[in-house]
Image: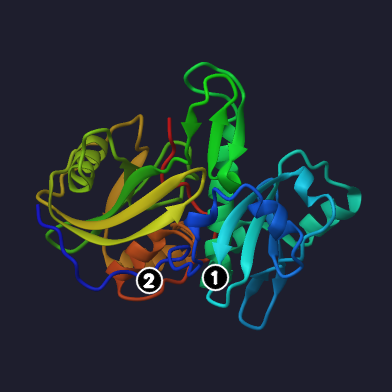
């Protein structure tokens, strides 16, 4: 296998320009000071939704100044922009939605990253991805994996410390590979999992296992899921995917043989497609591709040679991988 460093894909969620300013996270009064400063920008997460505003270019996050009572919630420091403005995220997990707020959600003022991400600029999509990843981690790490005692946030939301044994726990990222596999006729392999819509199709993906390189994970996952040996593994870019905590590392690879042998637990259907077949089936609705937010769609469209017309663009997207 070889690894190429040719021009990489421009991926959604991957170009956030915020300085995370990690060296100040240990300052004990950092969050108190930021929440007292009207220049601080607050990203309010209500569960996994943030408030958005339409613009001529698409969407932007509806950031606000700190408000009284923000300190009663879990707040994390996200960093500073090039102009020195500080950003924090308020993680509002226990919020009970009012009737007015429910209407706002219905009117799409409060949106998930899956729905809004492709319409946000790099700055705002990066903020949203960082905040959501931290929110998902805090949500699932309230207790110590060593002794089971309660953990509490430290270091501006970037550490959780066990109240019993004092151990410190840090945000985790699950590494996954995602790959566009082609055969000797330059057809692309598209597949769907058992839980997907019957017309869905996407490239293969899977989690990296302990002690495994990225390239080895690509080869193993393709062999396990569809029985195909691949060569010429080439890196194409990476994308944070906080659903709940992945980093998707994208590759292309070439199949030695087009003969498929599917693992029925992982793959319900898989086929090789020409460019004409993908374009026709996507346009007619016979084939549902991943959303434009996802690296999967970028890999498919890079192989195709340009944007594909989808009969009905998915707003939530296909789940590239699920942690079992």
Drawn side of residue 222 relative to residue 122, left or right: left
Instruction: Quickly name the residue at label 2.
Output: 10
Query: Could you tell me residue 138's position as x and y percent?
Result: 59, 38
| Foreground of the two, 160 or 299 | 160
In the orientation shown, which residue stands out farthest toward the top? Answer: 147
Query: Could you tell me residue 90's position as x and y percent?
Result: 70, 51
SS label for mark 2: loop
Q: Could you tell me how far apart the alpha carbons at marks 2 and 1 are, in whole angstroms?
A: 14 Å
> Is residue 315 visible from the viewing direction of this image?
no
What's the mark number on residue 195?
Answer: none
Drawn side of residue 67 relative to residue 246, left or right: right
Query: Could you tell me residue 68's position as x and y percent?
Result: 85, 54
Instruction: Quickly name the residue at label 1.
Output: 123
> Is residue 317 visible from the viewing direction of this image?
yes
Q: Quadrant of residue 79?
A: bottom right
In the orientation shown, which residue stands out farthest toward the bottom? Answer: 56
Please, is residue 207 above or below residue 149 in the view?
below
Which residue is located at x 53 percent, y 55 percent? 24
Which residue is located at x 66 percent, y 50 percent? 29
């Amino acid at each position: 296998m070889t690894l190429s460093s040719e021009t990489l894909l421009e991926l959604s969620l991957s170009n956030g320009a915020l300085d995370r300013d990690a060296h100040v996270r240990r300052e004990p009064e950092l969050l108190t000071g930021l929440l007292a400063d009207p220049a601080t920008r607050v990203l309010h997460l209500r569960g996994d939704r943030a408030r958005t505003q339409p613009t001529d270019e698409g969407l932007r996050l509806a950031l606000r100044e700190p408000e009284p009572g923000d300190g009663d919630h879990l707040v994390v420091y996200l960093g500073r922009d090039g102009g020195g403005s500080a950003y924090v995220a308020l993680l509002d997990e226990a919020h009970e939605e009012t009737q007015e707020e429910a209407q706002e959600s219905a009117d799409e003022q409060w949106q998930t990253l899956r729905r809004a991400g492709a319409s946000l600029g790099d700055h705002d999509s990066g903020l949203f991805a960082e905040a959501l990843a931290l929110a998902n981690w805090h949500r699932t790490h309230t207790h110590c994996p060593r002794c089971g005692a309660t953990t509490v946030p430290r270091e501006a939301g970037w550490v959780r410390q066990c109240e019993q044994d004092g151990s410190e726990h840090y945000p985790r990222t699950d590494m996954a590979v995602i790959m566009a596999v082609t055969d000797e006729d330059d057809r692309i392999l598209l597949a769907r999992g058992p839980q997907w819509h019957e017309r869905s199709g996407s490239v293969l993906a899977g989690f990296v296992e302990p002690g495994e390189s990225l390239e080895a994970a690509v080869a193993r996952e393709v062999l396990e899921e569809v029985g195909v040996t691949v060569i010429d593994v080439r890196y194409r870019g990476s994308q944070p995917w906080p659903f709940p905590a992945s980093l998707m590392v994208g590759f292309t690879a070439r199949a030695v043989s087009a003969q498929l042998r599917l693992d029925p637990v992982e793959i319900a259907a898989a086929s090789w497609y020409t460019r004409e077949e993908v374009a026709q089936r996507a346009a007619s609705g016979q084939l549902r591709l991943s959303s434009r937010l996802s690296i999967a769609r970028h890999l498919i469209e890079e192989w195709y040679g340009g944007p594909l017309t989808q009969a009905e663009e998915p707003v939530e997207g296909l789940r590239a991988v699920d942690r079992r």
